[in-house]
Amino acid sequence: MKILCTGCAGYIATTLVPLLLKQGHTVTGLDDLRQGGHGILGFYGHPNFSFYKGGINDTALTRLVMEDQDAVIHLAALVGEPPCNKWPQVAERVNYGGTVSLLEIAKSAGVKHFLFSSTCSNYGKQPGGELTEDAPLVPLSLYAETKIHAEKEVLTSNNDEMATTVFRFATAFGVSPRMRFDTILNEFVRDAAVNDWLSVHGKESYRTLVHVRDIAEMVVLTLEKRKEAAGQVFNVGGEHTTKLGLVNIILKYLPDLDFGFTDQINDPRDYKACFKKALAFGFKPRYSVEDGILEVMNAIQDGLFNDCNSSLYRNVP
């Protein structure tokens, strides 16, 4: 297939694109390089990869790169609560407005499948049982609000000509060419292995987690099953664990770690998402939380990153 991948230099895309190229697809990448372009260097010269620098709100550019595409994997966004809070107008313009614009251009270009990256953070704070895709959405941040609004546009655009699919990804972890240390598992391991101190608030709050390579596998699977995925929402994750659970695994490998807990700051997010629908679809997560902790810890200890605290490795402003 010919595939347009927005946000191609990001944490998920730089793991996904090599997989798509390996399978023989032709990939066009679009990214404004807000976080730099080092993540695409490994496949920049691949004969089936073309790169365009720019944002998804540049309609002339998006019309150009959309020509002759079979599918769009829309990953570009202002990701996370801190940057969205800092630049709220940009968040609305990119996360919502940019998605609406891409949808319209994709329809006009005859794209067959539009895949959209959303988040399990849309569930907000709903402690208790596992939440299915039909559970209420309780946005607690501007980031989640923009994703929910964009989801509605994506799903109502599903028709016989263009299938649309929404992924609500759990919080990603693991090593990627465009590494991030501002996702919870990666951040905890960084603080423990590099800063020798781990401070945790809301230790009993749950998180749903998924390895970035498992995310990539789910996207590839969905491309292969376009008809079954048409008009569908999938929670994509591997495990639930509390913050305390993460700390306990880290302590297995760093038993002398200095750490502390505080409940003075409430954690607004606390939920467990249900992954049964994705599993029935054929999704098979391969990497556990413990696998991810070991992977990130080994990468740090082997010196793969010059400065794990650098702004290069986070979306947080």
Image: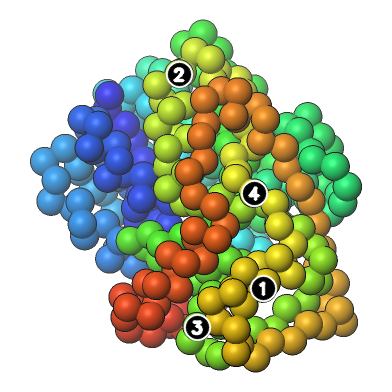
Residue 200, given in percent of the width and then of the height, sits at 73, 78
Q: Which residue is mark 2?
A: 225
Determine whether the residue tagged by mark 3 lies in a helix, strand or loop.
helix
> Which quadrant of the view contains residue 23?
top left
Q: Between marks 4 and 3, how big is the CA–CA gap?
A: 23 Å
Badge 3 crowding class, 10 Å Cα cut-off, few under 14, some 14 to 19, many 20 or more, is many
Q: Between marks 4 and 1, how big is the CA–CA gap?
A: 15 Å
Q: Between marks 2 and 3, how big is the CA–CA gap?
A: 41 Å
Are the residues flagged by discs 4 and 3 in contact, CB closer than 8 Å?
Answer: no
Q: Which residue is mark 4?
A: 239
N-term-proximal mark, 2 vs 4 = 2
> Which quadrant of the view contains residue 26?
top left
Task: Tell me the residue at 45%/73% (across/down).
Answer: 297
Are the residues flagged by discs 2 and 4 in contact, CB closer than 8 Å?
Answer: no
Of residue 94 and residue 214, the one placed in the foreground of this image is 214
Inspect the image, locate mark 4, and give the three-letter code of the amino acid beneath it.
Glu
Task: Tell me the residue at 33%/22% (across/down).
Answer: 70
Badge 4 crowding class, 10 Å Cα cut-off, few under 14, some 14 to 19, many 20 or more, is some
Q: Which residue is mark 3?
A: 193
N-term-proximal mark, 3 vs 1 = 3
